[in-house]
């Protein structure tokens, strides 16, 4: 059988994969479908349940769902969710799982607590979504070259490899950690700043970042 693999949210562009269409294609062709939702889990969907909730899909549509815990969850590690048969097979056969030390109990407990927060404190997700909308608005007002991402990952394409490093350094000197992403991580000529918004950012942070960017890109 074929295995089709996609990110839920693409890590360098912040765009969301067309999962319903890919899922339909997989069902038609009897292929497995696996989604890596590292950047969607905890941030996408009405209550942060990720790409499944965003698109109202279920385990029948995406039989192998994977996400990491080091991003929205703020801990470390990852998980795979799927049918009992799939999970049992992985437990019994996955060499990287068998020959490694189990997740420390403290990380597991911290992860459980993160899940509890995501499920019970909707203000964080509301803040994040508000920050994404506010960032895009500020970029529009300042004519900054923002892309068409509706997620926490907001790339700003600069093009030149050296220029992007210089801007990233200048931002760091002004108190902003915005990484420069260059080839081969992204295609030649599309070096970019990868701005990652969080629920803890404030409108003042975003004003300050976008005003600094506007000055640096003049
Ligand atoms: C799509 C995707 N999957 C998996 C990972 C790995 O995540 P972690 O570093 O938490 O293992 C990353 C890291 O950025 C990612 O972008």
Image: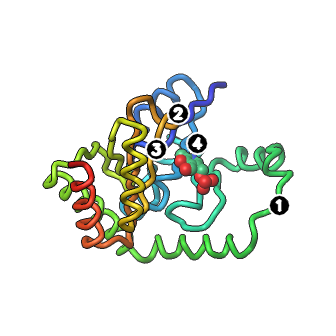
Element carrying mark 3? strand
As drawn, the label of residue 101 is 1
* Residue on which disc 2 sits: 184
From the viewer's perspective, is residue 27 above or below residue 162? above
Between marks 3 and 2, how big is the CA–CA gap?
Answer: 9 Å
Q: Name the residue: 52% across, 29% down.
A: 26
Question: Horizontal placement of 17 versus 202: left or right?
Answer: right
Q: Name the residue: 26% across, 60% down.
A: 212
User: Counting residues from the N terminus, which is met first, the one under dot 3 or under dot 1?
Assistant: 1
Q: Residues within 10 Å of mark 2 (few under 14, many from 20)?
A: few
User: Counting residues from the N terminus, which is met first, the one under dot 1 or under dot 2?
Assistant: 1
Position of the N terminus by quadrant: top right
Report the mark closest to the observer, 1 or 4: 1
From the top left corner, tell me how far across and down residue 182 is, in percent.
47, 39
As drawn, the label of residue 63 is 4
Ligand 1 within 8 Å of disc 2? The answer is no
- Foreground residue among 51 and 176: 176
Report the mark closest to the observer, 4 or 2: 2
* Residue on which disc 3 sits: 181
Q: Residues within 10 Å of mark 3 (few under 14, many from 20)?
A: many
From the top left corner, tell me how far across and down residue 71 is, in percent.
53, 60
């Amino acid at each position: 059988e074929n295995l089709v693999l996609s990110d839920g949210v693409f890590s360098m562009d912040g765009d969301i994969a067309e999962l319903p269409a890919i899922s339909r294609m997989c069902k038609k062709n009897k292929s497995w479908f696996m989604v890596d939702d590292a950047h969607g889990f905890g941030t996408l969907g009405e209550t942060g349940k990720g790409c499944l909730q965003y698109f109202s899909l279920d385990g029948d549509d995406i039989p192998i769902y994977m996400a990491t815990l080091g991003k929205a969850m703020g801990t470390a590690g990852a998980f795979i969710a799927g049918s009992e048969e799939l999970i049992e097979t992985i437990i019994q056969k996955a060499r990287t799982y068998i020959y490694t030390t189990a997740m420390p109990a403290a990380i597991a407990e911290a992860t459980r607590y993160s899940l509890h927060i995501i499920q019970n404190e909707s203000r964080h997700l509301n803040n994040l979504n508000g920050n994404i909308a506010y960032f895009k608005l500020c970029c529009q007002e300042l004519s900054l070259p923002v892309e068409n991402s509706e997620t926490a990952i907001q790339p700003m394409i600069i093009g030149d490899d050296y220029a992007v490093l210089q801007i990233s350094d200048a931002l760091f000197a002004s108190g902003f950690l915005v990484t420069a992403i260059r080839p081969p991580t992204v295609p030649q000529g599309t070096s970019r700043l990868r701005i990652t918004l969080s629920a803890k950012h404030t409108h003042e942070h975003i004003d300050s970042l976008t005003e600094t960017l506007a000055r640096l890109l003049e």
